[in-house]
Amino acid sequence: METMTRFKALVVEKGADNTFTRSLKQRDINELGAGELLVRVRYSSLNYKDALSATGHPGVTRQFPHTPGIDAAGEVASCSDGSFAPGAQVVVTGHDLGMETDGGWGEYIRVPSSWGVPLPAGLSLRDSMILGTAGFTAGLSVLKLEWAGVRPESGDVLVTGATGGVGSMAVSILAKAGYRVVAATGKAADEGFLRDLGAAEVISRAEVMAGAERALMKERWAGAVDVVGGEMLAAVLKSTRYGGTVTCCGLVGSAELPVNVHPFILRAVTLVGIDSSRCPSATRLEVWQRLAGPWRPALLGQMATEVTLEGLEDEISRILRGGVRGRVLVQL
Protein backbone atom coordinates (compact mmCIF):
# COMPACT_ATOMS: atom_id res chain seq x y z
CA MET A 1 0.00 0.00 0.00
CA GLU A 2 1.11 3.56 -0.66
CA THR A 3 2.44 5.39 2.40
CA MET A 4 1.91 9.13 2.78
CA THR A 5 4.76 11.16 4.22
CA ARG A 6 2.35 13.70 5.73
CA PHE A 7 -0.72 12.72 7.67
CA LYS A 8 -3.49 14.21 9.81
CA ALA A 9 -3.49 13.83 13.59
CA LEU A 10 -5.05 15.36 16.67
CA VAL A 11 -2.19 16.95 18.59
CA VAL A 12 -2.22 17.99 22.25
CA GLU A 13 0.24 20.78 23.11
CA LYS A 14 1.32 22.21 26.45
CA GLY A 15 1.60 25.96 26.84
CA ALA A 16 4.08 27.92 28.93
CA ASP A 17 1.34 28.54 31.51
CA ASN A 18 0.66 24.78 31.87
CA THR A 19 -2.53 24.96 29.81
CA PHE A 20 -3.24 22.38 27.12
CA THR A 21 -4.67 22.89 23.66
CA ARG A 22 -5.93 20.36 21.10
CA SER A 23 -5.91 20.86 17.35
CA LEU A 24 -5.79 18.93 14.09
CA LYS A 25 -2.40 19.19 12.43
CA GLN A 26 -0.40 17.77 9.59
CA ARG A 27 2.45 15.64 10.87
CA ASP A 28 5.38 13.93 9.16
CA ILE A 29 5.94 10.17 9.28
CA ASN A 30 9.52 10.85 10.39
CA GLU A 31 8.21 12.52 13.57
CA LEU A 32 6.88 9.20 14.86
CA GLY A 33 8.91 7.26 17.40
CA ALA A 34 10.94 4.10 16.98
CA GLY A 35 9.44 0.73 16.11
CA GLU A 36 9.42 -1.92 13.41
CA LEU A 37 5.70 -1.67 12.61
CA LEU A 38 4.17 1.26 10.70
CA VAL A 39 0.36 1.09 10.53
CA ARG A 40 -2.09 3.12 8.45
CA VAL A 41 -4.84 3.65 11.03
CA ARG A 42 -8.44 3.29 9.85
CA TYR A 43 -10.24 3.28 13.21
CA SER A 44 -9.50 4.19 16.80
CA SER A 45 -11.74 4.84 19.81
CA LEU A 46 -12.24 7.11 22.78
CA ASN A 47 -11.45 5.75 26.24
CA TYR A 48 -11.37 7.50 29.60
CA LYS A 49 -7.57 7.29 29.55
CA ASP A 50 -7.55 9.04 26.16
CA ALA A 51 -9.58 11.90 27.59
CA LEU A 52 -7.11 12.23 30.45
CA SER A 53 -4.20 12.30 28.01
CA ALA A 54 -6.01 14.85 25.84
CA THR A 55 -6.42 17.18 28.82
CA GLY A 56 -2.81 16.85 29.99
CA HIS A 57 -3.20 14.51 32.96
CA PRO A 58 0.38 13.78 34.11
CA GLY A 59 -0.54 10.29 35.27
CA VAL A 60 -1.07 9.31 31.63
CA THR A 61 1.11 11.55 29.46
CA ARG A 62 4.05 13.79 30.38
CA GLN A 63 5.68 14.49 27.04
CA PHE A 64 4.04 16.99 24.69
CA PRO A 65 3.20 17.61 21.88
CA HIS A 66 1.41 14.28 21.81
CA THR A 67 -1.26 12.36 19.90
CA PRO A 68 -3.57 10.31 22.17
CA GLY A 69 -5.43 7.12 21.25
CA ILE A 70 -4.72 3.90 23.14
CA ASP A 71 -6.49 1.89 20.40
CA ALA A 72 -5.71 1.58 16.70
CA ALA A 73 -6.70 -0.75 13.88
CA GLY A 74 -5.58 -0.59 10.28
CA GLU A 75 -3.30 -1.95 7.57
CA VAL A 76 0.42 -2.55 7.80
CA ALA A 77 2.29 0.06 5.78
CA SER A 78 5.66 -1.54 6.51
CA CYS A 79 7.27 -3.90 9.01
CA SER A 80 11.07 -3.90 9.10
CA ASP A 81 11.46 -7.23 10.92
CA GLY A 82 9.03 -9.18 8.72
CA SER A 83 6.55 -9.98 11.49
CA PHE A 84 3.70 -8.66 9.32
CA ALA A 85 3.30 -8.41 5.58
CA PRO A 86 2.42 -5.04 4.04
CA GLY A 87 -1.36 -4.72 3.77
CA ALA A 88 -2.05 -7.13 6.62
CA GLN A 89 -4.80 -5.97 8.97
CA VAL A 90 -3.73 -5.53 12.57
CA VAL A 91 -5.03 -4.34 15.93
CA VAL A 92 -2.88 -2.47 18.44
CA THR A 93 -4.16 -1.86 21.97
CA GLY A 94 -2.49 -1.34 25.32
CA HIS A 95 1.26 -1.27 25.90
CA ASP A 96 2.33 2.40 25.77
CA LEU A 97 0.21 3.39 22.77
CA GLY A 98 -1.45 6.77 23.26
CA MET A 99 0.37 7.41 26.52
CA GLU A 100 3.96 8.44 25.73
CA THR A 101 3.88 6.80 22.29
CA ASP A 102 1.85 8.72 19.70
CA GLY A 103 -1.46 6.92 19.37
CA GLY A 104 -4.42 6.10 17.19
CA TRP A 105 -5.81 9.63 16.86
CA GLY A 106 -3.46 10.04 13.93
CA GLU A 107 -3.57 8.42 10.50
CA TYR A 108 -0.30 6.57 11.18
CA ILE A 109 1.34 4.96 14.20
CA ARG A 110 4.80 3.41 14.52
CA VAL A 111 5.24 0.82 17.28
CA PRO A 112 7.25 -2.30 18.11
CA SER A 113 6.01 -5.22 16.02
CA SER A 114 5.35 -7.21 19.20
CA TRP A 115 2.46 -4.83 19.96
CA GLY A 116 0.53 -5.86 16.86
CA VAL A 117 -2.19 -8.52 16.90
CA PRO A 118 -3.44 -9.97 13.60
CA LEU A 119 -7.07 -8.99 13.10
CA PRO A 120 -8.99 -12.07 14.28
CA ALA A 121 -11.19 -13.84 11.75
CA GLY A 122 -14.78 -12.79 12.34
CA LEU A 123 -14.01 -9.13 13.07
CA SER A 124 -13.71 -6.17 10.73
CA LEU A 125 -11.35 -3.32 11.57
CA ARG A 126 -14.41 -1.32 12.59
CA ASP A 127 -15.66 -4.12 14.84
CA SER A 128 -12.28 -4.41 16.52
CA MET A 129 -12.33 -0.76 17.55
CA ILE A 130 -15.91 -0.85 18.80
CA LEU A 131 -14.46 -3.46 21.13
CA GLY A 132 -11.06 -1.78 21.57
CA THR A 133 -9.42 -1.60 24.96
CA ALA A 134 -12.85 -1.50 26.64
CA GLY A 135 -13.92 -4.78 25.06
CA PHE A 136 -10.52 -6.33 25.62
CA THR A 137 -10.54 -5.29 29.29
CA ALA A 138 -14.06 -6.67 29.75
CA GLY A 139 -13.06 -9.90 28.00
CA LEU A 140 -9.95 -10.24 30.15
CA SER A 141 -12.12 -9.75 33.24
CA VAL A 142 -14.48 -12.53 32.13
CA LEU A 143 -11.52 -14.80 31.38
CA LYS A 144 -10.10 -14.22 34.88
CA LEU A 145 -13.52 -14.99 36.43
CA GLU A 146 -13.59 -18.20 34.43
CA TRP A 147 -10.06 -19.11 35.51
CA ALA A 148 -11.12 -18.53 39.13
CA GLY A 149 -13.96 -21.04 38.76
CA VAL A 150 -16.88 -18.64 38.39
CA ARG A 151 -19.19 -20.41 35.92
CA PRO A 152 -22.68 -19.56 34.62
CA GLU A 153 -24.14 -22.05 37.10
CA SER A 154 -22.29 -20.40 40.01
CA GLY A 155 -24.86 -17.61 40.37
CA ASP A 156 -25.38 -13.95 39.55
CA VAL A 157 -22.47 -11.86 38.27
CA LEU A 158 -22.59 -8.12 38.97
CA VAL A 159 -21.26 -5.45 36.63
CA THR A 160 -20.81 -1.95 38.07
CA GLY A 161 -20.65 1.20 35.95
CA ALA A 162 -22.61 -0.85 33.45
CA THR A 163 -23.43 1.86 30.88
CA GLY A 164 -19.80 2.85 30.30
CA GLY A 165 -17.43 1.39 27.74
CA VAL A 166 -16.00 -1.47 29.80
CA GLY A 167 -19.22 -2.01 31.75
CA SER A 168 -21.48 -2.29 28.72
CA MET A 169 -19.01 -4.65 27.05
CA ALA A 170 -18.83 -6.79 30.19
CA VAL A 171 -22.63 -7.04 30.36
CA SER A 172 -22.81 -8.16 26.74
CA ILE A 173 -19.87 -10.60 26.90
CA LEU A 174 -21.05 -12.23 30.13
CA ALA A 175 -24.57 -12.63 28.74
CA LYS A 176 -23.21 -14.15 25.52
CA ALA A 177 -21.12 -16.56 27.64
CA GLY A 178 -24.26 -17.73 29.44
CA TYR A 179 -24.02 -15.88 32.76
CA ARG A 180 -26.97 -14.27 34.54
CA VAL A 181 -25.87 -10.64 34.62
CA VAL A 182 -26.98 -8.00 37.10
CA ALA A 183 -26.09 -4.51 35.83
CA ALA A 184 -25.61 -1.66 38.31
CA THR A 185 -25.94 1.90 37.08
CA GLY A 186 -26.74 5.40 38.25
CA LYS A 187 -28.63 6.06 35.01
CA ALA A 188 -32.16 4.68 35.42
CA ALA A 189 -33.09 5.87 31.92
CA ASP A 190 -30.65 3.35 30.42
CA GLU A 191 -32.31 0.23 31.81
CA GLY A 192 -33.66 -0.68 28.37
CA PHE A 193 -30.19 -0.32 26.83
CA LEU A 194 -28.70 -2.67 29.43
CA ARG A 195 -31.45 -5.25 29.05
CA ASP A 196 -30.95 -5.18 25.29
CA LEU A 197 -27.27 -5.98 25.91
CA GLY A 198 -28.28 -9.04 27.93
CA ALA A 199 -28.67 -7.91 31.54
CA ALA A 200 -31.20 -10.09 33.36
CA GLU A 201 -31.62 -7.47 36.07
CA VAL A 202 -30.77 -3.77 36.39
CA ILE A 203 -30.25 -2.24 39.83
CA SER A 204 -29.25 1.17 41.14
CA ARG A 205 -25.97 2.16 42.73
CA ALA A 206 -27.92 2.74 45.94
CA GLU A 207 -29.04 -0.88 45.99
CA VAL A 208 -25.44 -2.08 45.67
CA MET A 209 -24.38 0.26 48.48
CA ALA A 210 -27.24 -0.48 50.89
CA GLY A 211 -25.69 -1.68 54.14
CA ALA A 212 -22.14 -0.88 53.09
CA GLU A 213 -21.41 0.65 56.48
CA ARG A 214 -21.33 -2.87 57.93
CA ALA A 215 -18.22 -5.05 58.05
CA LEU A 216 -19.96 -7.63 55.86
CA MET A 217 -23.15 -7.50 53.80
CA LYS A 218 -25.62 -10.12 52.63
CA GLU A 219 -23.98 -12.59 50.22
CA ARG A 220 -25.26 -11.90 46.69
CA TRP A 221 -22.69 -12.24 43.93
CA ALA A 222 -20.87 -15.31 42.63
CA GLY A 223 -18.58 -12.87 40.83
CA ALA A 224 -18.35 -9.27 39.75
CA VAL A 225 -16.69 -6.99 37.23
CA ASP A 226 -16.04 -3.63 38.88
CA VAL A 227 -15.01 -0.57 36.88
CA VAL A 228 -15.80 2.02 39.56
CA GLY A 229 -13.44 1.40 42.48
CA GLY A 230 -13.69 3.21 45.80
CA GLU A 231 -16.70 2.68 48.04
CA MET A 232 -18.54 0.80 45.29
CA LEU A 233 -15.81 -1.83 45.04
CA ALA A 234 -15.71 -2.11 48.83
CA ALA A 235 -19.46 -2.80 48.91
CA VAL A 236 -19.17 -5.37 46.13
CA LEU A 237 -16.45 -7.22 48.02
CA LYS A 238 -18.54 -7.21 51.20
CA SER A 239 -21.53 -8.68 49.37
CA THR A 240 -19.76 -11.33 47.29
CA ARG A 241 -20.59 -14.91 48.16
CA TYR A 242 -18.19 -17.35 49.81
CA GLY A 243 -15.37 -18.25 47.42
CA GLY A 244 -16.45 -15.67 44.85
CA THR A 245 -14.18 -13.53 42.69
CA VAL A 246 -14.27 -9.80 41.91
CA THR A 247 -12.23 -8.26 39.11
CA CYS A 248 -11.10 -4.64 39.38
CA CYS A 249 -10.26 -2.62 36.27
CA GLY A 250 -11.28 0.99 36.90
CA LEU A 251 -11.26 3.95 39.25
CA VAL A 252 -13.88 6.36 37.96
CA GLY A 253 -15.32 6.47 41.49
CA SER A 254 -12.06 6.60 43.41
CA ALA A 255 -8.60 5.08 43.49
CA GLU A 256 -8.98 4.46 47.23
CA LEU A 257 -10.37 1.17 48.59
CA PRO A 258 -11.99 1.64 52.04
CA VAL A 259 -12.50 -2.02 52.93
CA ASN A 260 -11.63 -4.33 55.84
CA VAL A 261 -10.16 -7.83 55.57
CA HIS A 262 -13.40 -9.65 56.48
CA PRO A 263 -14.45 -10.55 52.90
CA PHE A 264 -11.06 -12.14 52.35
CA ILE A 265 -10.57 -14.06 55.60
CA LEU A 266 -14.19 -14.96 56.42
CA ARG A 267 -15.60 -15.56 52.93
CA ALA A 268 -12.44 -16.40 50.94
CA VAL A 269 -13.30 -13.72 48.38
CA THR A 270 -10.65 -13.12 45.71
CA LEU A 271 -9.90 -9.67 44.29
CA VAL A 272 -8.24 -9.88 40.87
CA GLY A 273 -6.59 -6.87 39.26
CA ILE A 274 -7.06 -6.40 35.51
CA ASP A 275 -4.36 -4.66 33.48
CA SER A 276 -4.93 -4.50 29.74
CA SER A 277 -1.67 -2.68 28.95
CA ARG A 278 0.95 -5.29 29.87
CA CYS A 279 -1.14 -8.42 29.37
CA PRO A 280 1.02 -11.34 28.10
CA SER A 281 0.79 -11.97 24.36
CA ALA A 282 -0.68 -15.48 24.66
CA THR A 283 -3.49 -14.25 26.92
CA ARG A 284 -4.06 -11.22 24.68
CA LEU A 285 -4.50 -13.48 21.67
CA GLU A 286 -6.88 -15.77 23.54
CA VAL A 287 -9.11 -12.88 24.58
CA TRP A 288 -9.22 -11.44 21.06
CA GLN A 289 -10.07 -14.84 19.58
CA ARG A 290 -12.94 -15.26 22.02
CA LEU A 291 -14.18 -11.73 21.32
CA ALA A 292 -14.24 -12.57 17.62
CA GLY A 293 -16.02 -15.88 18.26
CA PRO A 294 -18.12 -17.13 21.18
CA TRP A 295 -17.97 -13.87 23.16
CA ARG A 296 -18.73 -11.51 20.29
CA PRO A 297 -21.39 -9.10 21.63
CA ALA A 298 -24.75 -9.72 20.00
CA LEU A 299 -25.38 -6.00 19.38
CA LEU A 300 -21.78 -5.00 18.67
CA GLY A 301 -22.62 -2.71 15.76
CA GLN A 302 -25.15 -0.81 17.89
CA MET A 303 -22.88 -0.22 20.87
CA ALA A 304 -20.94 2.72 19.48
CA THR A 305 -21.35 6.33 18.46
CA GLU A 306 -19.10 7.06 15.45
CA VAL A 307 -17.19 10.32 15.10
CA THR A 308 -14.28 11.68 13.07
CA LEU A 309 -11.22 13.37 14.55
CA GLU A 310 -13.07 16.67 14.07
CA GLY A 311 -15.93 15.42 16.25
CA LEU A 312 -13.85 14.30 19.21
CA GLU A 313 -13.92 17.55 21.19
CA ASP A 314 -17.49 17.19 22.47
CA GLU A 315 -16.99 13.50 23.22
CA ILE A 316 -13.87 14.19 25.31
CA SER A 317 -15.86 16.53 27.53
CA ARG A 318 -18.76 14.08 27.69
CA ILE A 319 -16.69 11.08 28.80
CA LEU A 320 -14.99 13.12 31.52
CA ARG A 321 -18.46 14.03 32.85
CA GLY A 322 -19.52 10.38 32.82
CA GLY A 323 -22.03 11.09 30.06
CA VAL A 324 -20.94 8.52 27.45
CA ARG A 325 -23.09 5.43 26.95
CA GLY A 326 -21.37 2.48 25.31
CA ARG A 327 -18.43 3.19 23.02
CA VAL A 328 -17.19 6.08 20.92
CA LEU A 329 -15.65 4.91 17.65
CA VAL A 330 -13.19 7.22 15.88
CA GLN A 331 -13.16 6.88 12.09
CA LEU A 332 -9.99 8.08 10.37
Image (cartoon, rainbow, N blue to C red):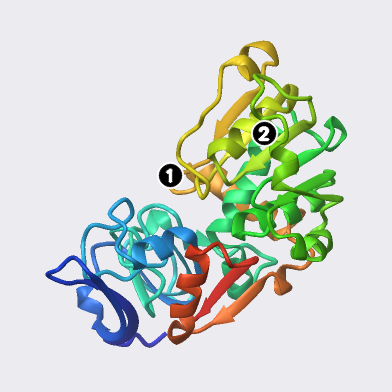
User: Badge 1: few (under 14), some or many (20 or more) residues near its Cα, within 10 Å?
Assistant: few
Q: Is 230 displayed left or right of 141 in the figure? A: left
Mark 1 or mark 2, which is nearer the start of the sequence? 2
In this orientation, does residue 210 appear?
yes
Task: Tell me which residue sits at (55%, 62%) in the image.
Answer: 322
Q: Which mark is residue 278?
A: 1
- Residue 318 position in % (x across, y down): 52, 70
Task: Tell me which residue sits at (62%, 17%) in the image.
Answer: 264
Q: Is residue 152 above or below residue 43?
A: above
Q: Amino acid at mark 2?
A: Val
- Quadrant, the N terminus: bottom left
Task: Tell me which residue sits at (58%, 53%) in the image.
Answer: 136
- Residue 109 position in % (x across, y down): 35, 71
- Residue 217 position in % (x across, y down): 73, 24
Of circles 2 and 1, the one toward us is: 2
Q: Quadrant of residue 21?
A: bottom left
Q: Amino acid at mark 1?
A: Arg
In this orientation, does residue 332 appear?
no
Query: Does dot 2 land on a helix, a strand or a loop?
Result: helix
Q: Quadrant of residue 164?
A: bottom right
- Residue 64 position in % (x across, y down): 21, 66
Q: Is 317 displayed left or right of 155 in the figure? A: left
Q: Is 200 displayed left or right of 41 in the figure? A: right
Residue ranking furthest to the left? 16
Task: Tell me which residue sits at (51%, 66%) in the image.
Answer: 319
Seen from the viewer's position, the closer of residues 154 and 27 is 154
Q: Is residue 68 above or below residue 182?
A: below
Q: Which mark is residue 236?
A: 2
Would you say the residues marked 2 and 1 are in contact, meaning their CB atoms lie under 8 Å apart?
A: no
